[in-house]
Image (cartoon, rainbow, N blue to C red):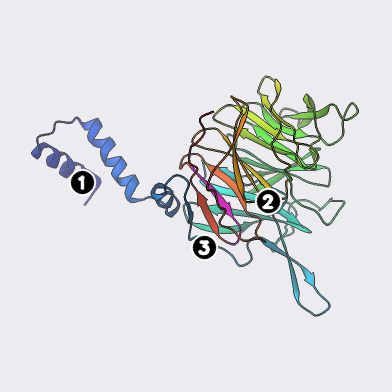
């Protein structure tokens, strides 16, 4: 049955039941029914979840998705290192409906999940890591060990995924054609994209003695960095995330202080209430609740909500993480579905529940 015949059948059925509709209403109803019938596995699972619930998404994935091969022990046993840990930097692109994350542990690994195919894949990095190709650029990193920290960012408007490197460059992956370009400079610890403003780089060296650390903005016309404002703490181990609900960005100092600030697009920096606990990037993840705009802080088996409007923290009662002791899951919120995707040994969804009355 073609679409026109189906539309006629729908309208006839409604008329038989004594309902009067116009063609626009009928078309809208038919479109909704068709979209519902073609729902992805991800969207079906998300829609069936209740607030506060976890669920596993059965997605296809390559073996050892979250690990890289780094050599052999003296015994001949293979050694694989986890590419996450010390990060919460997964990115969800609503336009292409995919999760993107560049992990790092001795070598980088660029992974992506596609909602359309419900599977994970490994993408080519700028140096050809974990691929058969040589990559576009020579590897200029000055160290072979470490973590990814906050060096991922996504410009969804222009379809660009950024990753800053220890080699003194920021690399840009263009989603449309899968090519890489690079820009000189960028933080070795924390970058984040502020829509309508640009790519921001939180530096680790102060311009004054531990009182003012540059937050640099990338000028797209010249691909050069200029100071946008300063923050009261270093980008070292800091966490930064853009909040689309409030059009602001949050910065959390990480393991050297409990300091928290928010940033508006006009450059206004607001000092918020300090965290009520010590937090490290190794054990902490921050995600913007796609439903409320609250900041969800996952930390050592606990979950806190932070409301930047009222400057208050609240513990989420009865929260229990579903992953194991040695897992280091990477999250990203999916705004259009109202859930958060976490990936490690499994692909998990969490639907936040709004409890804050702040």
Q: Estimate the x, y position of residue 199 in percent, counting from the top left.
A: 70, 33
Q: Is residue 237 magenta?
A: no
Is 31 positioned to the left or the right of 334 in the image? left
Residue 225 badge: none
Q: Which badge, 2 or 1, comes first in the chain's sequence?
A: 1
Q: Which residue is mark 3?
A: 60
Farthest-out residue, right: 209
Q: Estimate the x, y position of residue 120 in percent, counting from the top left.
A: 56, 58
**Region rendered in magenta:** 339-345
CA separation in Å, label 3 and label 2: 19 Å
Q: Estimate the x, y position of residue 335 in percent, counting from the top left.
A: 50, 39
Q: Main secondary structure of the magenta part?
A: strand
The residue located at (57%, 49%) in the rendering is 99
The residue located at (62%, 51%) in the rendering is 301
Q: Dots 1 and 3: beta carbons under 8 Å? A: no
Q: Nearer the viewer, mark 2 or mark 1?
A: 2
Kindly state the secondary structure of the residue where label 3 is placed.
loop
Q: Dots 2 and 1: beta carbons under 8 Å? A: no
């Amino acid at each position: 049955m073609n679409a026109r015949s189906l539309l006629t059948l729908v309208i006839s059925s409604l008329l038989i039941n004594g309902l009067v509709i116009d063609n626009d209403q009928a078309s809208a109803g038919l479109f909704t029914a068709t979209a519902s019938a073609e729902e992805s596995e991800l969207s079906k699972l998300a829609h069936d979840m209740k607030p506060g619930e976890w669920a596993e998404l059965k997605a296809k994935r390559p073996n050892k998705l979250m690990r890289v091969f780094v050599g052999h022990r003296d015994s001949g046993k293979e050694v694989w290192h986890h590419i996450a840990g010390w990060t919460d930097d997964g990115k969800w692109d609503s336009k292409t409906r995919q999760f993107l994350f560049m992990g790092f542990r001795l070598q980088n690994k660029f992974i992506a999940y596609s909602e359309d195919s419900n599977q994970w894949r490994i993408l080519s990095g700028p140096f050809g890591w974990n691929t058969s190709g040589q990559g576009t650029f020579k590897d200029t990193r000055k160290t072979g060990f470490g973590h990814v920290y906050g060096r991922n960012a996504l410009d969804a408007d222009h379809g660009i995924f950024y990753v800053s490197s220890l080699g003194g460059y920021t690399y840009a992956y263009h989603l449309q054609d899968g090519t890489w370009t690079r820009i000189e400079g960028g933080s070795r610890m924390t970058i984040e994209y502020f829509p309508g403003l640009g790519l921001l780089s939180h530096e680790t060296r102060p311009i004054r003695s531990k009182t003012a650390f540059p937050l640099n903005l990338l000028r797209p016309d010249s691909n050069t960095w200029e100071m946008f404002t300063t923050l009261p703490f270093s980008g070292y181990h800091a966490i930064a995330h853009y909040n689309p609900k409030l059009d602001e960005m949050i910065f959390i100092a990480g393991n050297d202080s409990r300091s928290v600030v928010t940033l508006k697009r006009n450059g206004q920096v607001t000092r918020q209430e300090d965290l009520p606990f010590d937090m490290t990037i190794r054990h902490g993840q921050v995600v913007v609740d796609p439903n409320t705009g609250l900041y969800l802080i996952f930390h050592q088996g606990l979950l806190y909500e932070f409301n930047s409007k009222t400057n208050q923290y609240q513990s989420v009662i009865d929260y229990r993480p579903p992953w194991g002791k040695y897992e280091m899951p990477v999250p990203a919120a999916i705004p259009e579905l109202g859930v958060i995707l976490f990936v490690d040994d499994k692909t998990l969804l969490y639907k936040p529940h709004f409890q804050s009355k702040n």
